[in-house]
Image (spheres, rainbow, N blue to C red):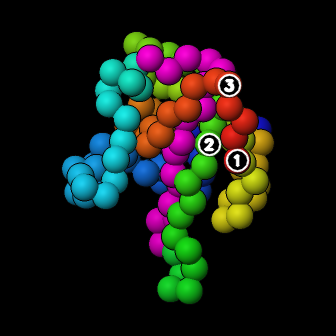
Amino acid sequence: MTHTLTQIEGCTFIDGIERNRENPKTFGIPTAQEISEVQPGWWIKVGLEKKAPAEWERGGERFWLKVTSVDKKSSLFIGQVDNDLTLFPDLTDAVLTVEGRHVIGIQEPPWSGS
């Protein structure tokens, strides 16, 4: 199953650049240079948040994507979810497309997610 940024109804990916700008001491992100070096086979951490969570509900979840394709010109990353998700279980093993600004962590191989 492939999803794009706008196809996950009621949700939005965390904008790491914006979140880091708002909370520079507590929300670290990879540098633009580090993000530009990501290759297929690496993992990137992203976060997905519900646009309007119920008061009792957790609003978001962070997880790893194993990168399968990189479009460096447009800073797009395609990867497969590499965690068992609790808030978004339908996305477990899904293939997602995210922008570089959504990358909030990077892990080079060898590494096994989760």
Please state which amino acid type lies under the numbered disc 3.
Pro
Of badges 1 and 3, nearer the viewer stands 3
The residue that disc 1 covers is 114
Determine which quarter of the picture holds residue 104.
Answer: top left
Span of residues in magenta: 37-52
Residue 29: x percent and y percent? 36, 42
> Are the residues at dot 3 and dot 2 in contact (C-beta closer than 8 Å)?
no
Please state which amino acid type lies under the numbered disc 1.
Ser
Residue shown at the point (48%, 49%) measured from the top left? 13
Residue 85 shows in the view? yes
CA neighbours of label 2 inside 10 A, class few (<14), some (14 to 19), many (20+): many
Determine which quarter of the picture holds residue 103.
Answer: top left
Mark 3 or 2, nearer chain start: 2
Residue 5 shows in the view? no
Q: Element under label 2?
A: strand
Q: Element under label 3?
A: loop
Front residue of this view, candidates 85 and 113: 113
Front residue of this view, candidates 8 and 90: 90
- From this view, report whether residue 69 is shown above or below residue 18: above
**31 with respect to 54 (left or right):** left
The residue that disc 2 covers is 64
Residue 90: x percent and y percent? 76, 55
CA neighbours of label 3 inside 10 A, class few (<14), some (14 to 19), many (20+): few
Of badges 2 and 1, nearer the viewer stands 1
